[in-house]
Amino acid sequence: MARPHRVRLRGPAEPPRRGHLPFADAPGVPDPIEVGSRVLTRGGRPWFPVSGEFHYSRYPAGEWEEELLKMKAGGVTVVAAYVIWIHHEETEGRVRFDGDRDLRRFAELCARHGLDFIPRIGPWVHAEVRGGGLPDWVLARTAAPRTDDPAYLAPVRAWYRAIAEQLRGLDRAGGGPIVAIQIENELYDQPDHLLTLKRMAQEAGLSAPLWTSTAWGGVRLPPDELLPLYGGYPETFWTEADGGWPDTCRKHFFFTHQRDDEGIGADLRPTMVRGGDPEELSDRFPWATCELGGGMAVAYHRRPRVEAADVGALGLTKIGCGSVWQGYYMFHGGTNPPGDLTPLQESHATGYPNDLPRLTYDFQAPLGEYGQYRPSYDELRLQHLLLADFGGLIAPMESVLPERLPAGQHDRETLRWAVRADDRSGFLFVNNHQPHEPLPHRPDTSFEVEFPGDGPVLSLPSAPVTIPQGAYFCWPLRLEVAGLRLDWATAQPVCTVDGGHGRTILVLAATDGIAPELALDLRTVTTVSAPSDAEVTTAGDRALVTALRPGTDALVEVDTADGRRVGVLVLDAATARGAYRGPAWGAERLILSADGGVVFDAHADEVRLHSAAGEPSFAVLPAPRRAPVVPGALVKEAEDGVFVRYTVVAGDDGRTGDDVLPVTLVRPAGEAPPVTTGVMGRASVPAEAYFDSAAAEYRVALPDDPPPGTLLRLHWTGDVGRAYVGERLVADQFYSGRVWEIGLGRLPVGELRVRVLPLAGGAPVYVPGRVGDAAIPAELLRAECATVRPWPLCPG
């Protein structure tokens, strides 16, 4: 038998410092935000925010509200957004905050739905935008942008005043949602300029309890003026086409206490600058993040694919490392505005190292360019449900690494795990997933966790298990819930929910390939009732529940020693990924949906299920007294374990499957364009003329009057694809092996033409799945459309 993996938890550490930083919330707010050396607090209690980036100016304003509700249902509590200067003032003096640029309305919508807001005001933001967001006219005025050059600071000062006017009254003093403001972005070596920008923003009238800065790349910050925020991505578009999977990405799939990522933005820093964790930052500030990769953009020369497990494993690992703020970039994708004067994407033509698509900024995000739900949304939501209930418990806990650590970043044999704990309880984190280089199964695995004091070592599980390849999870240790102490469970906490009749239910998610096991502290228990196929045995002060088949009926009920009743429900992994919790029909409820995404709209007293299924179903706990009503449809009701399941039967209104659309080849592709190179010798997007002379052209017959939520899905191969209505470019894509999706609701009326360029053999372009440097022909193989309908679920 293999030796158990062991960790010894330290005794009580020195208490975290408080009051040593000059951050202050607005006087008199009911829930003041404070920053200690290890934790953030709000209203005096540990606060574990989850922030997600959503660029309002890259998304139609009429759809903002529903997308914000999707983010909230996904567990996001704070919305972050770059305020992209060139989107608002492309022409000097013509400052626009109308339509899709209405910053104030976006912030007000966040407030309306209980979401905090962080404007990232730049002025340089990067964001894969032309000039990093600086308008061309600003760059023409100064030879020293991003410095204290007076010729640069003058327009910045006016820009900050314009932002402040839009956000007036929306700060914390006015009861608004702004909890933080980010200054600049990725500026690693000019602390005096960062301080100048902060003072200018304050003089303009901007205020927030937290002022932040990105902190990667060996950053130097003005002392105690800006809260350092970190990041980490599973893949990169900004590295070389032939560079393989970067070590700076690989490191994020290990448990470590190093916060910095020297790889982010490294193509824009001198090569001699390396990352590091300045000791004064890690000693004085908690580990907070703003750019954990929710996906990744694609550049012309490098087109990475990010899978849901990559995003989920990275996020969970960061919690185990010690993060107290999970911040994702991007959480929601978007589309670049076309620009009145020039295209607005980062490009070789603008002197940047990467050519980006002209329009798409989908970022492979959990919520896509057209609001599509991605599997990564489910992976992250499961973690955010954990943080919603237990984040306040986890945040003050220290991260402790085990005795046996991986020998280096290429060690695939040593188990990757860590514990976050205090002297009473904790959470055990395991990551057995990384992209590109799968980690092996881990047979015969068990753990020993030694808490401080004279108590026995916690040994779990009762018998060694095999941790499957690709698994990542969090197990509770000595978790107390409503009078019950759960010594351990080989399943991940999801949330607690009111089970009715004074009963609290702790919901857990099983891990595929690992049998769920519950260890209950008998000193907190008087009776235990389990499903008939489960086994309950006792040994000393512990009751062990095994042979439990996870599902909606896998409920273990306990009467506690203090007279309460607690249920422990273990869902199977697939079902748990469809779990949502929120206010529905007058109470807080858990909803299971495998057929689409759920949003909770308290203002409309409505739950909406976004689904492409013809007869979508969902299960609810606790069930409402009367079945929800769907206008124009019948709702069927049935038991589903401890849940009640409802199925919407819409008759002729239901839509099922994908509708294949006629595709006509208008012109076959010519010879692939020759490769040209730009900044840093990287391959550049072919010149415009080739889209007329070398691209295959197809005509796609679109449906008449498609309903809202209809996606066009193009199965294709090639190099670059562009879609036009008339002469207007309406969508574009670099080929990476994924289906190309286009929201039909965004298209003007007219015939859709799709042009596809072939990729030449030998082109120095990284495309996932490409065999060597083989050519890729230009083909539009199939077009189909599918409608995701928002089903309103009204009170019965």
Image: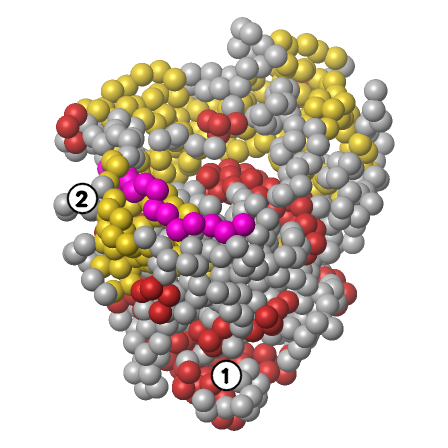
Quick check: is 691 in the magenta stretch? no
Q: Residues within 10 Å of mark 2 (few under 14, many from 20)?
A: some
Task: Label 1: state its secondary structure.
Answer: helix
Seen from the viewer's position, the closer of residues 187 and 306 is 306
**Residue 791 is covered by the magenta coloring:** yes
Residue 585: quadrant of the picture: top left
Q: Give the class, few, some or many, for how many residues have Cα within 10 Å of label 1's Cα (few <14, many ≥20).
A: some
What secondary structure prevails in the magenta region?
A: strand
Question: In the rendered image, is residue 168 in sight?
Answer: no
Farthest residue toward the front? 671
Residue occupying the point 80% across, 32% down:
5
Q: Amino acid at mark 2?
A: Pro
Quarter holding residue 448: top right
Q: Pointer 1: what residue?
A: 200
In this rendered view, identify the residue nearer to me: 599 or 668. Answer: 668
Which quadrant of the figure contains the N terminus? top right
Magenta range is 774-792
User: Of the residues tagged 2 and 1, which is closer to the observer?
Assistant: 2
Compared to residue 587, the image places residue 224 above or below, namely below
Look at 82% across and 45% down and name the residue there: 407
Q: Is residue 766 visible?
A: yes
Gap in Å between the C-alphas at discs 2 and 1? 52 Å
Q: Does 80 appear above or below 126?
A: above
Contact check, label 2 and label 1, Cβ < 8 Å:
no
Q: Which residue is mark 2?
A: 703
Instruction: Provide residue 281's location: percent of width, then percent of height.
Output: 71, 66
Residue under the point 83% across and 24% down? 2
Quarter of the C terminus within the rendering: top left
In the displayed structure, would residue 105 be above or below residue 340? above
Residue 617 spot, x, y in % from top left: 32, 26
